[in-house]
Image (cartoon, helix red, strand yellow):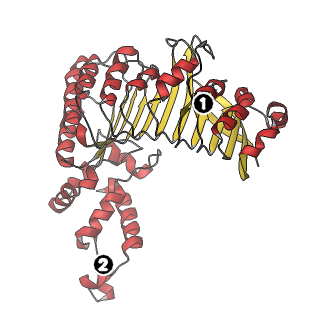
Amino acid sequence: MPSISASLRSGIRSSFSIFGRPWLKTISADKSSASHITIADLPNEILVQIFLFTTEPTNGIVDKIDHALISKTPICSPKTMASPFPLSQVCQLWRQIILDTKAMWRSIALSNPTIRHVHRVELWMERVKNHTIDILIHLNYPHTFPSEHHDAIVQIFEFLGRRATTWRSLEFGTSHFIPPPLITSLRGLSTANSSCLRRVTVSTPLLERPVDELWAFLHNIQSIEMLWWRGPHVYRATRSSSSRLQFLELSGISKAIMPSIPTFLVNTLSPFANIEELFINFQFEPPLPTSSQDELPRPIVFRKLRRLTIGAEIWLKDFAERFTAPALQYLNVSSGDTLYVDNFLRRSRCVLTEFIMHSVPAYRFGDLFDLSVLHYFTAHLRLRLDYMIKITPLFHISPTFST
């Protein structure tokens, strides 16, 4: 198979570096014979390692040698494992090895699934059986979504839903349009109660109804440890019942339905007492008031919070009045929040090892920041000043100065 030969050769070299060549002695003691060994002579355990190497993720960049392989399978993603289907079609031995190696089926990626995906998804779910699986679904359909694919969407989510209790991670992304059948499918997933799901990433600009359906599914999952929510209606997070959440990212733009930023912060974040890392980069349209007339309650203590990033301007003031983080080591705020760093650190009684201030040129650091608060930092403080380039609705940070 010329389409996978280069990848197989690379896998063989990798396997040799891991296992060495002791098995060569069992094949032949004659060096001249050993030099003519083909892939058909390799033990099954070596073939397994080669196949796993061949289907490993490409870290976001599709290698040239994989183009032909990817073109043969409708289920593919540069961020997840390549499909093992082509390898299983070479011969009976390879097929048996691949079917018996559950690690070959541990992740599935669907990009704009259509009717041609249905059979492969069904087979994939049969192969994975009761093993945990990583799910990646990207939906970027045009508004002229063909009606013949509607039933396919329902069937695909039905197959995935049958294994919902074994999902280990879910990455779900959509455009502004979503096929109506998918709403029904998401509603069906809300009855699933997975005990394996640990990581969830949601990237969507969708309107309220489909977002509510997706949140309804997540609200029943108590095992989630890491959640990236990049989209509107982030206040739905208040319904989450996962007390195990350790990482939370809330970013995007949404309608202003909360009375104030403090109310939003308290209602949204207070359920997550065990959070260890928090990333907030949320904006409301129109902007919410940055203070409320409510009497300040006793601050909520995030006893395990070690890393805090606030990308939105002037949110640290309200955060500092409602929360403390005695274990905080890393703080990343904008130049608009520098006046409130002292209050937050004083109330938290923490000692930072890394402090980042973005949206500020290095030469203005002394003007914007009171150096007297540096006693809250360790002697080994890592200080970084960054410019920030805004990319709606998220941000990209590129460092310009560090000491």
Q: What residue type is labelled 2?
A: His
Image coords of residue 285 (percent x, y): 56, 12
Residue 41, numbered circle? none
Q: Residue visible at 22% across and 38% down? A: 121
In this picture, is 162 found above or below 64? Answer: above
The quadrant where residue 19 appears: bottom left
Q: Can residue 85 be seen in this view?
A: yes
Classify mark 1: residues with Cα within 10 Å, few (<14), some (14-19) or many (20+): some
Q: Which amino acid does label 1 sit on?
A: Phe
Q: Mark 2 points at which residue?
A: 36
- CA–CA distance between discs 2 and 1? 55 Å
In this picture, is 375 found above or below 254? Answer: below
Classify mark 2: residues with Cα within 10 Å, few (<14), some (14-19) or many (20+): few
Can you say which quadrant of the picture contains the N terminus?
bottom left
In this picture, is 65 found above or below 321? Answer: below
Image coords of residue 62 (percent x, y): 44, 46
Residue 395, numbered circle? 1
Image coords of residue 178 (percent x, y): 34, 19
Q: Which of marks 2 and 1 is nearer the N terminus?
A: 2
